[in-house]
C-alpha cells in the first residue's frame, strides 16, 4: 500500500517517469525538535519530499475519523498553496493516513524548496477549515467506509481486530455517527495535540548542496517548539484460550480462514506478555526471519502436499508503537470448514516451527537482509524513502534503522530456532472463518 503511495509521486512533472539513484544519507535533529533526513541522489533539479508525522488513527480513541479528516484537508490546502508560486512548477501531492502515521509527499523543483517548507509550516500550525470543507470530507470518508464494508473479508477482519484489541483504538470499530458529530473545534484540538514538532520528520531527497541553509529555513518556519507524548494504550493479556468465530458471506465459494497472533515490536519495550507469560518476550528479528521461511514452507505443505488449501497469504508488522500482529489467511479447498481442518493447519505451523530446515532458514535470512538493504549505492531512492518513511513515522530511531540490516545479518540462527519454538508454544489469539452462504436447493 505505502509502496503504491510513493510510486504515484514519480508519474508527473513534464509527463516523464524517472528514477534517481541513492548516493548517501544524513540525519539531523534540529534545534526546534524537528528531524530531517537528507537522501542524496545523482544530480537533478528535482526534490522529493515526505513529511512524516507520527500521528494516525490510533490517536483518535473515538474512532471518529479525525486523523483522516485533518490529513485530507491538510493535503489539499498544502497542494493549493504550493501551486500559488508564480515562478514555481505545478506540484501534486499524495498522502497516506495509517494506524500510527500520516505521510504527505510531493515532487517539486529544488529551487522551490524554501517556499514549499514555508507552506508546510503555515498549514501545519494554522490549518483553517470551513464548515463546507468539513462536510465534504465527512461525506467522502463515510462513502469510502460504506464501500469498504461491502466486502465480506473486511467485515471479518473488523470483528477479528475487535477480539484481538479489546482496549486499544485499533480494535474499536470506526463510527459514522461519531464522524458526523465531529466539529471544527474537535479537529483543532486533535491537531494541536498531535501535530507537534517532536513527531515530525522531513525526508528530503535530491541533489541538495546547501543542507545548512535548508535546515535553517526549517528551523525558522517550524518555530513553535511544541511537544506531545505519543500514547498508545497497551493491550493487556485477556484471553486464556483462542477466540474463534464464524461468519457467512456471498462473496466466497470456499471457506476463508484467518489466524492471528499478536507480535512484539522492534522498540525493545517490555512486552505486555512479560509478567504473566515470560516466554512471549521473543526477538522480533528471530520471528521476521522465520516468517519468510514459514510462508514458503506453509504454501508448499498445505497447498501441494496436504492439499488442504488453494491459497495462502501472510500479513504482519513489527513496526508499531505497541504490539503488532501476524495474520495468516488460508482459502480452503473443501466446501465446509471443520475443526479437523483447523487442527491440520495449526499442526503444520507448529511442525514447521519445531523442525526448521537450517539451509532454508539461511536462505530466508539472506532474503530478509536483501529486502532491507536500502542504504546502498545501487538503490533507487524511492525504495530507500519508502522503507525509511514507513518505519520512522511510527517512532523508530534513524540510527536503529541504519543498522537494522546488519542486525539481521549477524543474528544467530540457533537463536532463531529457540525463539520461534517459544513463540509458537502459545496458541493463536483469534481464529476467524468466513463460510460461503448455503444456497437453497432449486427443485
Image (tube, rainbow, N blue to C red):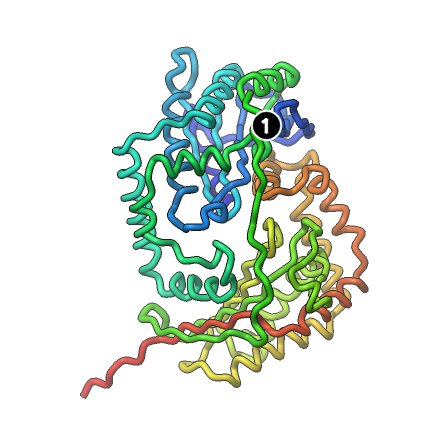
The residue beneath circle 1 is: 205
* Count of number-bearing discs: 1
**Residue farthest left in this picture:** 443
Which percent across, then down, holds residue 389? 58, 39
Residue closer to the observer: 129 or 408: 129
Front-most of residues 19 and 190? 190
Q: Residue at x 32, y 49 (%)?
A: 144
For the residue pair 64 and 160, the one nearer the viewer reads as 64
Q: Find the residue positioned furthest to the top.
A: 87
Percent position of residue 70, x then y: 40, 37
Residue at the spot x=58%, y=27% of the render? 204
Residue 89 spot, x, y in % from top left: 42, 18
Vertical relation: 294 (above or below) 113? below
Q: Is the residue 230 above or below the residue 49 in the image?
A: below
Q: Classify 10 Å Cα crowding around label 1: few (below 14), some (14-19), many (20 and above).
A: many
Task: Name the residue nearer the viewer: 88 or 418.
Answer: 418
Q: In this view, does 80 lie above or below 418?
A: above
Is residue 17 visible in the rendered image? The answer is yes
Q: In this view, does 411 lie to the left or right of 275?
A: right
Which secondary structure lies at badge 1?
strand
Using the image, determine if residue 351 lies above or below residue 227. below
Image quadrant containing the C terminus: bottom left
What is the quadrant of residue 13 in the picture? top left
| Visible residue check, residue 383 | no
Judge left or right: residue 240 versus residue 365.
left
Residue reaching furthest bottom? Answer: 443
Residue 106: give x, y in percent of width and height. Answer: 47, 29
Amino acid at each position: 500500500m505505502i509502496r503504491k503511495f510513493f510510486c504515484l509521486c514519480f508519474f508527473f512533472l513534464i509527463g516523464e517517469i524517472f528514477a534517481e539513484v541513492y548516493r548517501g544519507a544524513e540525519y539531523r535533529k534540529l534545534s526546534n525538535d524537528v528531524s530531517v533526513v537528507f537522501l542524496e541522489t545523482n544530480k537533478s533539479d528535482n526534490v522529493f519530499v515526505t513529511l512524516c508525522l507520527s500521528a494516525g488513527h490510533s490517536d483518535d480513541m473515538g474512532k471518529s475519523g479525525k486523523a483522516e479528516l485533518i490529513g485530507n484537508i491538510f493535503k489539499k490546502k498544502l497542494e493549493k498553496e504550493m501551486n500559488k508560486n508564480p515562478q514555481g512548477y505545478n506540484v501534486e501531492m499524495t498522502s497516506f493516513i495509517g494506524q500510527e502515521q500520516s505521510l504527505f509527499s510531493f515532487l517539486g523543483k529544488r529551487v522551490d524548496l524554501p517556499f514549499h517548507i514555508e507552506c508546510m509550516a503555515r498549514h501545519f500550525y494554522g490549518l483553517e477549515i470551513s464548515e463546507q470543507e468539513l462536510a465534504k470530507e465527512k461525506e467522502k470518508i463515510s462513502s469510502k467506509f460504506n464501500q469498504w464494508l461491502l466486502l465480506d473479508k473486511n467485515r471479518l477482519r473488523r470483528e477479528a481486530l475487535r477480539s484481538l484489541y479489546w482496549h486499544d483504538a485499533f480494535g474499536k470499530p470506526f463510527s459514522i455517527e461519531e464522524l458526523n458529530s465531529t466539529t471544527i473545534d474537535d479537529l483543532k484540538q486533535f491537531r494541536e495535540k498531535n501535530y507537534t514538532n517532536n513527531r515530525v520528520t522531513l525526508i528530503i531527497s535530491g541533489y541538495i548542496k546547501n543542507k545548512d541553509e535548508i535546515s535553517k529555513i526549517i528551523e525558522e518556519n517550524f518555530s513553535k517548539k511544541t511537544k506531545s507524548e505519543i500514547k498508545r494504550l497497551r493491550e493487556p493479556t485477556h484471553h486464556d484460550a483462542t477466540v474463534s468465530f464464524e461468519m457467512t458471506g456471498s462473496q466466497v465459494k470456499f471457506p476463508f480462514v484467518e489466524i492471528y497472533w499478536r507480535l512484539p515490536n522492534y522498540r525493545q519495550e517490555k512486552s505486555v506478555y512479560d509478567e504473566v507469560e515470560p516466554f512471549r518476550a521473543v526477538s522480533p528479528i528471530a520471528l521476521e526471519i522465520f516468517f519468510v521461511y514459514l510462508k514458503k514452507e506453509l504454501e508448499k505443505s498445505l497447498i501441494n502436499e496436504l492439499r488442504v488449501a488453494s491459497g495462502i497469504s501472510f500479513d504482519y508488522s513489527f513496526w508499531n508503537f505497541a504490539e503488532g500482529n501476524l495474520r495468516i489467511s488460508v482459502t480452503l479447498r473443501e466446501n465446509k470448514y471443520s475443526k479437523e481442518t483447523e487442527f491440520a493447519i495449526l499442526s503444520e505451523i507448529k511442525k514447521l516451527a519445531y523442525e526448521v530446515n537450517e539451509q532454508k532458514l539461511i536462505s530466508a535470512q539472506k532474503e530478509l537482509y536483501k529486502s532491507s538493504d536500502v542504504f546502498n549505492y545501487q538503490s533507487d531512492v524511492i525504495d530507500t524513502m519508502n522503507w525509511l518513511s514507513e518505519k520512522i513515522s511510527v517512532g523508530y530511531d534513524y540510527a536503529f534503522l541504519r543498522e537494522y540490516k546488519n542486525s539481521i545479518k549477524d543474528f544467530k540462527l540457533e537463536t532463531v530456532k529457540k525463539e520461534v519454538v517459544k513463540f509458537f508454544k502459545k496458541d493463536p489469539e483469534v481464529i476467524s472463518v468466513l463460510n460461503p452462504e448455503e444456497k437453497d436447493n432449486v427443485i
